[in-house]
Image: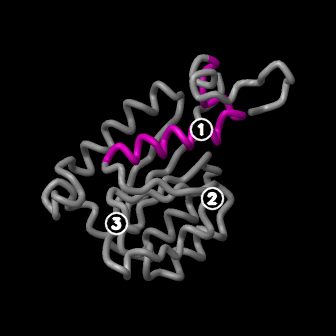
Amino acid sequence: MPTPPLIFVLNGPNLNLLGTREPQIYGRQTLSDIVLSLHERAAGLRLTVEARQTNHEGELIDWLHEAHERKAGAVILNAGGFTHTSVAVRDAVAAIAPPVIEVHLSNPYGREAFRRQSLIAPVSKGGIHGFGAQGYLLALDAAARLCVGTGAATKAQTKEQGIENGPSGRRH
């Protein structure tokens, strides 16, 4: 049996405070709660999740490089405040092969003006914003779809996601 694809889930500054930091914006679930739900979903998708959190820009960049070196199937990235300020994180995302899915618990486009620009969005595969903790699960589902060719999804899951080969034999 092949090794399940590895999905890095990288979290930036202040996400260690989830559940207590501005719960009216970010919700009451802790990062540990989110990671537990990711592991549960990943098992069903035949993925391996490696989740990390740091408050340090350089460490986040090192982890992005590691995802590349370890040939991760995808990276789910909530860079927190670095999203809006870090050219270095943006450049690291641009430099690696694994597709990066940007996640934000809140909808930055409905918040303060300084949060409305993501330096990461132009170099990421896509983004999921404003769905709270559920956004991480949506990102994991997207990562599974990106990894379909590597055996990450079962036939039933591929059919459910609408990406099976149709009568034409082409991918939809």
Q: Amino acid at mark 3?
A: Thr
Name the element at disc 3: loop
On whether residue 143 falls in the magenta region, the answer is yes
> Over which residues does the magenta segment extend?
133-155
Q: CA distance from mark 3 to mark 1?
A: 23 Å
In which image quadrant can residue 34 be found?
A: top left
Q: CA distance from mark 2 to mark 3?
A: 18 Å
Q: Residue at x 41, y 61 (%)?
A: 78
Q: In the image, is residue 63 above or below residue 41?
A: below
Q: In the image, is residue 4 above or below residue 75?
A: above
Name the element at disc 2: helix
Q: Residue at x 40, y 68 (%)?
A: 109
Name the element at disc 1: loop
- Sequence-earlier tag: 3 or 1: 1
Which residue has dot 3 on it?
54
Which residue has dot 2 on it?
68
- Sequence-earlier tag: 1 or 2: 1
Q: Quadrant of the C terminus?
A: top right
- Sequence-earlier tag: 2 or 3: 3
Image coordinates for residue 151, horizontal then vertical, percent? 66, 29
> Is 26 in front, or is 48?
26
Q: Main secondary structure of the magenta part?
A: helix
Image coordinates for residue 157, horizontal then vertical, percent? 57, 23
Q: CA distance from mark 1 to mark 2?
A: 13 Å
Which residue has dot 1 on it?
5
On whether residue 48 falls in the magenta region, the answer is no
